Image (cartoon, grey):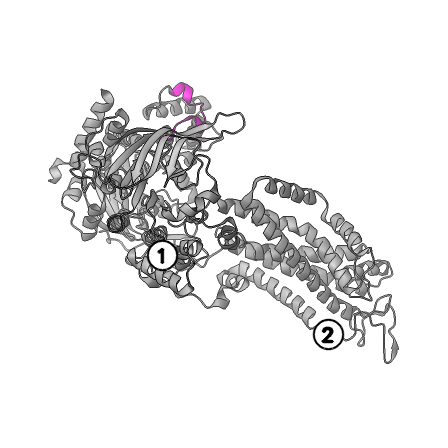
Amino acid sequence: MSEELDVRPAGPAEIVLDIDDLEVSFATDAGEVHAVRGVSLDVKAGEVVAVVGESGSGKTVTAKTILGLLPETATSSGAVVIKGQNVISLSPAKLRELRGRDVAMVFQEPSTALNPVFTVGWQICEGIRAHRARTGNHRISRKEARERAIESLRKVGIPDPEKRVDYYPHQFSGGQKQRVVIAAALALDPELIVADEPTTALDVTVQAEILELLRDLRDLYGTSIVLITHNMGVVADLADRVVVMYQGEVVEEAPVRRLFAEPREDYTRRLLAAVPHLGRESASEGATQRLRQGGEVLVAAEGLEIVYPGRLGSPPFRAVEGVSFTVSAGEVFGLVGESGSGKTTIGRAIAGLNRATGGSLKVLGHEMVGFRERAFRPLRKEIGFVFQDPAASFNPQLTVGECVAEPLIVHLDLQTAQVRRRVGELLESVQLPASYASRYPHELSGGQRQRASLARALALEPRLLIADEPTSALDVSVQAKVLELFREIQAELGFAALFISHDLAVVDQLSHWVGVLYKGRLVEQGVSSRVMGDPQDEYTKRLIASLPVPDPVEQAERRKAHRALLGG
Amino acid sequence: MTAQTLPEIERHDPLWTRLPVVSHVRASVGVQRGMLIVGLVLTLVFLLLALLAPVIAPYGFSQISDASGDFPTQEPPSSKHIWGTTVGGFDVFSRVVWGAQTAVLVIVVAVALSIFAGVALGLASGYIGGWLDRVLVVIADAIYAFPSLLVAIVMSIVISHGQSSLWGGVLAAAISITVVFIPQYFRVVRAEAIRLKAEPFVESAKVIGASSWRIMARHIFRNATRSIPLIFTLNASEAILTLAGLGFLGFGIEPTSASEWGFDLNKALSDVTAGIWWTGIFPGLAIVLTVLGLTLVGESMNDLADARLRTRRHGGKNRGKKRPEGSKA
């Protein structure tokens, strides 16, 4: 791939943002922490520059510096020049003037970026009216501001903007809320938008729409975008140029196609290799029928229904409706779906954390509809559970060793020395040194904690393991290692697993059989590689087409296919 | 920021630096540290007075005469009675010193009783929930609705029928304060227990198959009680005020059983108009300084425990410092 192939917007390459040797450090309890060390980058007009990196790489701090949004504990040096003004040395009043007019921000979580007690129109107008002074003493009237708000809502594709300008944030869906946030950012026609993980909190299908919108902004209005993300698929889809950050420094900077095709630096290469890619390394490669069906059926759901009682006056919420599936011994069953699809609810019901309310759910032969904790407790040692957030699933007051030992102490009658030996073995089996047993959870990194969590789940050699989004809180390179470990241990111990995830590529890597959930219904199930490669259901097709793959060339083709699918 | 290979683990600090108050002092800087230290010094003086009362006080708390005869009454400060004497002929300095002892006793007994009951009830109420929770919350709210001094008076009458020996008086005061404080500990621990109940680590204990008892004792208890030292210090100062209030109103401890600042203040009331200042000023100051000390400690601990309120040392003041030109990469 050569650089000439890159799509570049026409027009003069005026530089809208110039960051020069930026350094940011924070005063913390543990002394000073250098978050950004000597970062230099520039953004030209009409260009999308993606800043990628794992957590702690300093990408978000860099983004916040562009708008002067650093907290009080931060000290910064260097230069961040927007329109000839250095943001770092600007007075608060000048900074306020600059924000919104020259540079605006789109936040990660649209539901918290909007104030729930004001209409979206009011919130957009607020930004417009705050800047009235700049338009040569001409006061922008309420009416005029409203006109502009409607205009920018129309720009971001909110249907019927004249009416919806008076809606409150809760009346919009997640994707629409993010559109509103973008509309607010656009209200004063800034030349530069800083988007901090703009699609991370959104579902894949919605993410595709927002990426489409951001691309239109660049193409139609020539807006430059600084895109902060950790998702290489998003980068491949949207960016013109990529800046890779690691530990506060810029490791590599290259046009997007060159970066993906010929990464120069070791770190970039490792990062790209760790990104799961749909259709590669499928666990069910070449399988034509369901694998590992010889053993006992451990989980059998038949018309399963899970209903949450509604609050006074509102109808009950049906989280899961008429779902039927089985998980056999030794099989890895992948459950995928977007947020609110009921996938976690099903996992929790199997572990007895939620109540199943209708149909039938048999776990290890025990009926879970109307189960009693006392009767189910002996079976709990056959079930392991790995939670999503490894940081929260350990008691912060106990050492890792004590946490891992909990199941042993609860279910087995062992001597202290035996427990200690077993904990050491368990930690070593998940590739952690046995000496880590005496550390506290906060002294471990995210990946190490998730390994320890796996060790705890496997302590009693369960026949069934439920993993609820076990890697979604981890960085890609860490995720790759944890997934590898999971696969190895599963092959070695042969337990059955229910692997719940929203990430299709991850599920494909691990599971033999996959079920796709949509709004509480199981719309499709089949051999993973087949479902991913040749989906049958309409929703599954849309879901898979929306997923950006970490390869700009392939993604450009997929995008066309996606458009065709939506159009037809 | 995570380090590239393994996070560097600092060895654990020695145990003494991790104790509540010590760790707070170490974490504090500037004005916050000043406040904390002033509070600690006042509290320490108070505790030392209580502990060393027999050594420090020249006379007993109920002593009105010595080898050279009866003490004069309402005598201004002199070399023999450095803070003067009261209308009953007690030595004011000795009464104030002995009063610290009574105050400490009442605090210890009151807080010990209310912490155990409050924490146990709060844990059960928050974790188990259901009707037990509802009943306990209603009772706690009902107690809250009463003015605390009124409850204390009623309890003191019920417990000791008005007359009191040292322990009778101390217990009456302590138990009446306990009744008022249990709902406070109960509330805090219950709220924490409810929050923790939904935490993944509690759920993971549930999935493991741990019993409710084990979950409460091992997983919730230690995490729910982190703010207890803070309430303890704040409540200690309130306990002193309640005790002094009870004594002032005449529900305290007889002067012959123990010394009590509130009672002394009450007796000093009529002296004020006669220009006799020493009988009122000193017990009053003792109350004010002790409460001030305990409150300062409590408030500082509160601020330091909250990462958003804690001030930190800046590494270097280089805000806005210009870099040399031509260093662009």
Disc number at residue A444?
1
Res A432 quadrant in image: bottom left
State the residue in front, B205 or B6: B205
Q: Position of residue A227 (x, y in %)?
A: 28, 39
Chain under callout 2:
B
SS at mark 2?
helix
Q: Residue furthest bottom?
A: B67
| Quadrant of the drawing holding the N terminus of chain A | top left
- The amino acid type, in three-letter code, at marker 1 is Leu
SS at mark 1?
loop
Q: Position of residue A298 (x, y in %)?
A: 33, 40
The residue that disc 2 covers is B54
Res A301 quadrant in image: top left
- Relative to A53, say whether B87 is above or below: below
Q: Residue at x 71, y 55 (%)?
A: B175
- Relative to A236, say whether A404 is above or below: below
Q: Position of residue B244 (x, y in %)?
A: 75, 57
Between the residue at mark 2 and the residue at mark 1, the CA separation in whole angstroms equals 53 Å
- Relative to B34, say whether A302 is above or below: above
Q: Position of residue B243 (x, y in %)?
A: 74, 57
Q: Residue at x 32, y 58 (%)?
A: A427
**Is the stretch drawn in magenta largely helix, strand or loop?**
helix
Which stretch appears magenta?
A161-175
Chain under callout 1:
A
- The amino acid type, in three-letter code, at marker 2 is Pro
Q: Is residue A562 left or right of residue B130?
A: left
Q: Is residue A253 left or right of residue A229?
A: left
